[in-house]
Image (cartoon, grey):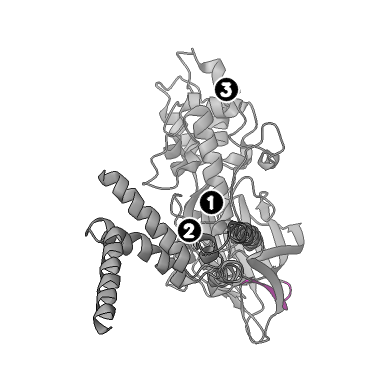
């Protein structure tokens, strides 16, 4: 009985809402004074209006998600300065290089003085430590012949990261001299070590390692009335140099801006240009799927402090190795907080067999049957770096050198700006609802009021429509009695 009364009260409140609400057409539908055909006509009009507003809103939301951000080109002011790109230096393996620390470690594996030095083990270790010396199928070929040997040096089965740490050159051993626009600076103050897929590398002006503008950040600004922009690096070992954005890291699959200096006496000059990109402040308020890029401070699930496309690709390849072989190469361990499983000998053999230790760049193409599909978006702050040309020569000296030179100052830059923002959604959707339905914010308040306050007062507090009818009948009776008394 109580449920029946509650339902009756709800229905009467619903009818009362339709008769008195501000939404267009509802009053004609609920009012019994109008003929059935009139009420049916208004019902059809309301349905058509609601359907039209729905399709318009869906079309607008689709347009918003596709075209909320635009990329335009604007001129650079003559007094604006350009920041020289970050540069990474990674030591490379060189067959003609003598690695005394590696030889010492292999000698320590000898159990007797009669045991011969094993050059196959040395070749194996060089390919494990330096990615550029690795070739597909070389893991087991060097170690398999000595698997059952009792009087020879065998390949180590674990601890490869410790071997790499001892063999690779330190910053002081790697750099001979660094110059910015002809002025010498302390290499190891600004070049900081970082672990990458290429092994331990040294980066200058990287936000992954130092605070921008801090003590370890070298001011390399180029502009009219400022320096021309020349970075000269003299190194003592075979290296590979990378031109990077300040949030990027060297990567084995991204070799477009990679330059190698392997033979002794090798000297190279690289001419480049930079086209900057700036973002309007409101760009960061737009969803990532809409702007199709990620700001460096927005991602925290990676082991690197800042997000970049190269960081995302590194994590993608690392996860692929773990998925295929339950471990990853020791070069993928980025720090003490990285608890990923490190491959031992059997794990490296698995990576070698599945060709994910040092895969070809084409593995990134998703249309390949064995492609490594990485859902990585570019960084919103990465600039466009172009190599215009390069010159190289061999000189009579023991060291190597590379010079990066800004060939021309940028005259234009990209700007990522908002075409539509979230406030536009409110305005546009509100305008559509107001045009087709006569709705407003007060319409929502009205809806909440009728089905909360009115419903509670009618059902919980006991004030029902029957009571209202009785009160109305009593008032009419009183008025009728007073009228009779007058006459």
Question: CB under 8 Å between callouts 1 and 2?
Answer: yes
Q: Residues within 10 Å of mark 2 (few under 14, many from 20)?
A: many
Visible residue check, residue 31: yes
Visible residue check, residue 409: no
Relative depth, front residue between 58 and 396: 58
- Residue drawn at (73%, 78%) of the image: 411
**Image coords of residue 68 (percent x, y):** 63, 66
Image: 154 above or below 253: above
Q: Is residue 161 magenta?
A: no
Q: Of the two numbered discs 3 and 2 on the same chain, state the one appearing first in sequence.
A: 3
Relative depth, front residue between 312 and 428: 428
Quarter of the picture containing the C terminus is: bottom left
Image: 217 above or below 259: below
Say what secondary structure mark 2 lies in: loop
- Residue drawn at (25%, 74%) of the image: 478
Residue 311 is marked as 1
Say what secondary structure mark 1 lies in: helix
Q: Residues within 10 Å of mark 3 (few under 14, many from 20)?
A: some
Disc 2 marks which residue?
Answer: 306
Disc 3 marks which residue?
Answer: 140
Q: Which stretch is magenta?
A: 407-418
């Amino acid at each position: 009985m109580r449920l029946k009364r509650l339902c009756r009260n709800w229905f009467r409140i619903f009818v009362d809402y339709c008769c008195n609400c501000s939404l267009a057409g509802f009053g004609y539908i609920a009012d019994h004074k109008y003929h059935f055909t009139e009420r049916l006509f208004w019902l059809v009009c309301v349905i058509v209006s609601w359907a039209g507003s729905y399709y318009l809103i869906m079309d607008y939301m689709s347009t918003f998600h596709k075209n909320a951000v635009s990329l335009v080109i604007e001129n650079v002011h003559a007094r604006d300065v350009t920041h020289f790109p970050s540069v990474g230096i990674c030591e490379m393996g060189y067959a003609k290089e003598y690695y005394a620390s590696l030889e010492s470690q292999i000698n320590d594996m000898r159990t007797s003085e009669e045991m011969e030095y094993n050059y196959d083990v040395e070749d194996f270790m060089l390919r494990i430590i330096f990615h550029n010396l690795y070739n597909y199928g070389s893991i087991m070929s060097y170690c398999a012949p000595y698997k059952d040997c009792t009087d020879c040096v065998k390949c180590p089965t674990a601890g490869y990261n410790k071997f790499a740490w001892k063999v690779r050159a330190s910053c002081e051993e790697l750099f001979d001299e660094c110059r910015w626009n002809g002025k010498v600076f302390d290499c190891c103050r600004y070049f900081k070590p970082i672990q990458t897929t290429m092994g331990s590398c040294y980066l200058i002006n990287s936000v992954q390692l130092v605070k921008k503008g801090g003590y370890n950040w070298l001011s390399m600004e180029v502009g009219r009335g400022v320096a021309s922009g020349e970075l000269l690096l003299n190194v003592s070992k075979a290296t590979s140099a990378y031109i990077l954005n300040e949030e990027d890291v060297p990567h084995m699959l991204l070799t477009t801006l990679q330059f190698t200096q392997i033979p002794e006496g090798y000297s190279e000059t690289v001419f480049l240009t930079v086209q900057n990109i700036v973002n309007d402040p409101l760009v960061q308020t737009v969803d990532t799927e809409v702007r199709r890029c990620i700001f460096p401070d927005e991602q925290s699930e990676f082991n690197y402090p800042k997000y970049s496309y190269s960081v995302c690709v590194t994590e993608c390849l690392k996860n692929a190795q773990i998925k295929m072989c339950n471990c990853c190469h020791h070069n993928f361990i980025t720090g003490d907080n990285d608890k990923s499983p490190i491959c031992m000998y059997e794990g490296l053999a698995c990576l070698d067999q599945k060709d994910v230790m040092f895969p070809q760049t084409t593995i990134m193409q998703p249309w390949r049957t064995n492609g490594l599909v990485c859902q990585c978006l570019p960084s919103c702050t990465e600039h466009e770096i172009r190599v215009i040309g390069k010159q190289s020569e061999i000189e009579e000296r023991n060291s190597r050198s590379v010079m990066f030179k800004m060939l021309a100052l940028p005259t234009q830059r990209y700007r990522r700006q908002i075409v539509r923002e979230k406030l536009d959604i409110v305005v546009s959707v509100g305008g559509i609802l107001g045009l087709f339905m006569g709705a407003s914010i007060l319409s929502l308040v009205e809806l909440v009021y009728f089905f909360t306050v009115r419903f509670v007062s009618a059902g919980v507090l006991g004030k029902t429509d029957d009571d209202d009818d009785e009160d109305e009948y009593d008032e009419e009776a009183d008025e009728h009695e007073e009228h009779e008394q007058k006459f």
